[in-house]
Image (cartoon, rainbow, N blue to C red):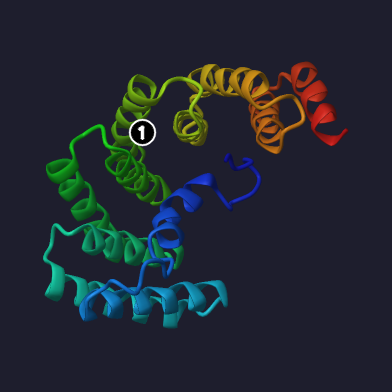
Amino acid sequence: MFRERTERRSCRTAAALFALFLSISPASRAQDEDPRQAWKELNSRVVAAYQAGDYADATALAEQALALARRSFGEEDSDTVTSMNNLAALYRSQGRYGDAEPLYVKCLETWRRVLGEEHPDTLVSMNNLGALYESQGRYADAEPLYVRCLETMRRVLGEDHPGTLTSTNNLAMLYYSQGRYGDAGGLYVKCLETMRRVLGEDHPDTLTSMNNLAALYRSQGRYGEAEPLYVRCLE
């Protein structure tokens, strides 16, 4: 669920690509009409190319899938918005932030209008746009999105929900990136306490959360507090 500070493969990347793997699996094909079937088949090829590491081919196929969805289903169809998110995620993974941003913005605007502010798909889109801004160092743009996402997750899903914990970690890491260690620390501590209670001491997500807090303490020169956390992670 969480990324470790020293590794750049992040929970945010996973979240941004979540729709790519969730919504394009080739299920329920028999009942589809031709355009919908063609869309699903294109997206299956996107997944195959992405998993093979052929990002150029995956991107070209995702562009085709979005064009087909817009033409056949309209801008507010869920498959069209999914295609936007998938293509934005691929652009972002290649550092094409200028291409990704308008797609993420359009996704969020559409989900807000169609599904409402508190729907899980809206919150994922909000997180994705925040993650894109953070990737660009646009912390002032990312923060209100992360804050809003976390507040809504807490209210709608509860403190212990995995989505809430991911959102808490995302905001903590944004603060950490800006050197706002006091703000980050409270969120990291909250994550770790909840992980220990919900998942147990030895769960991989708990250990990653522990490592994040240790990294924060180390950055603050609080070596005595960091050491036992690092040791526990390694045991």
Q: Is residue 201 above or below residue 119?
A: above
Residue positioned most to the front: 31
Q: How many marks?
A: 1
Q: Position of residue 114 (x, y in %)?
A: 14, 45
Q: Is residue 109 above or below residue 149?
A: below
Q: Quadrant of the N terminus?
A: top right
Q: Tell me what residue is drawn at x 48 percent, y 52 percent.
A: 13
Q: Which residue is mark 1?
A: 146
Q: Secondary structure at mark 1?
A: helix
Q: Tell me what residue is drawn at x 36 percent, y 33 percent.
A: 146
Q: Tell me what residue is drawn at x 43 percent, y 57 percent.
A: 22
- Mark 1: which amino acid? Tyr
Q: Position of residue 77 (x, y in %)?
A: 17, 59
Q: Position of residue 165 (x, y in %)?
A: 50, 29
Q: Is residue 10 above or below residue 184?
A: below
Viewer-side residue, 128 vs 172: 128
Viewer-side residue, 170 vs 197: 197
